[in-house]
Amino acid sequence: MNPKRKRFYHIAISLTLIIIGVIVMIVLTASKPELKKATHSAPVPMVRVMKVETKPRSVTVRGEGTVQPLREIDLVPQVGGKIIEISPALVNGGEFSKDDKLLSIDPVDYELAVTLAKAKVKDSESNLKIIQEEALVAKEEWRVHHTGNSHTRKDPPPLVAKEPQLAAARAKLDADRADLKKALLNLERTVFKAPFNGLVSKKLVDVGQYVSPGQAVARIFSTEAVEIPLPLEDKTLFWFDVPGFTPGDGPGSFATVRSSIAGREIVTSGRVVRAEGKLDEKTRMITVVVRVDRPYAIKPPLAIGLFVTVDIEGRILPDAAVIPRAALHQGNIVWVVNGDGILKFRTVTVARYQGEGIIIESGLTSGEMVVISPLKAVTDGMTVRTAMAKESNSK
């Protein structure tokens, strides 16, 4: 077969196959059933909601700090000597009451000083009496020798009346009495008494040791009250009263102090007494001081050095609600769902973030449903399905 005829056959076969394929496709297309266009409705999203309850609510400001003594001092004797007695309470952690005898210094030298001072006073008193008698005699002799003489004054001259001698004798007596008073005071100071009710922080001396004036013998602190410094943000002081710092003349706000020690929780009450009056230059915080009276009256005690949490009772908002933090969007927007399942954006006034919740001062009313679950796509006026949350944060 020549090449031209062979090429012709190949082309013919190819065209035949193409035509057959086109015919088959047309037949299949004509026999396929027509697809109907289906319309699908968008699913309504499900959200969790909580019922809002508005009522008077107290704003609580929380702070943390360490318990510090109201007064802590070093016991320092004003006289020197050998310690001859120490109270059993003068040990680390020992408890004592005001005016309890804590230690005694050997009083012998001071008793001798008192005896000498008394002798000097007696001598000065005797000398003054002698000079007084001599002055009376001198005055009488003056009157006898000068009676009836019109050119002579009635009173004798000061030297004749021994007035300088009397003044010197009186001054000497006053000085000796002052020395006696000082000697008695030094003798009294050999017995060291507690200046207040308290505990011993650290004992520094023992029996037989010689101490000099100004040497510390122990460190003690008062148990009548303790103070808790709380560093707080400046704006939080708007919510509670700080005497001498915030407006008003009333007492400071009440506070609840919580901590744990010895496996038990401590809950006691205190009061804001002052602010330290300046902001920390680095943190821009201001320190507020809370005082707790009789911290060692409870067992276990609110001990010095204990780390505590303090809740300060602030101002009362008359018609406020509490919602979870997840319910607030863009700083002041809340999603509210009405009875028809329509979600609406609501602008509210936030008073304060408190714990896991937020206090809403205005913008919500009792009974409204607030969305507390997230939504990926949300619009104002959209329809939603609701499920009530098991627990409410509005209480």
Image: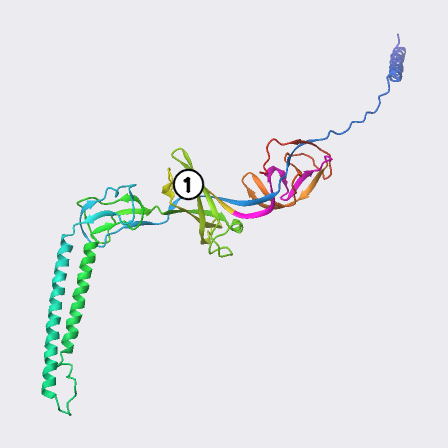
User: Where is mark 1, residue-wise?
Assistant: 307
> Who is closer to the viewer here, 3 or 353?
353
> Who is closer to the viewer here, 26 or 359?
359
Q: Residue at x 15, y 58 (%)?
A: 114
> Who is closer to the viewer here, 344 or 225?
225
Relative horizontal placement of residue 106, taking residue 246 as reference (left or right): left
Q: Quadrant for the N terminus, please.
A: top right
For residue 303, say whether it is visible: no
User: Is residue 189 within the magenta segment?
Assistant: no
Model colouring: rainbow
Q: Which residues are magenta?
A: 314-341
When the figure is inspected, residue 332 is found, relative to residue 45, above or below; the finding is: below
Question: In the image, what residue type sits under mark 1?
Answer: Phe
Q: Quadrant for the C terminus, please.
A: top right
Q: Residue at x 46, y 47 (%)?
A: 231
Relative horizontal placement of residue 290, taking residue 153 as reference (left or right): right
Quarter of the rendering containing residue 119: bottom left
x, y percent for residue 297: 37, 42
Relative horizontal placement of residue 306, taking residue 238 as reference (left or right): left
x, y percent for residue 356: 55, 38
Say which element carries label 1. Answer: strand
User: Is residue 335 within the magenta segment?
Assistant: yes
Q: Residue at x 60, y 35 (%)?
A: 392
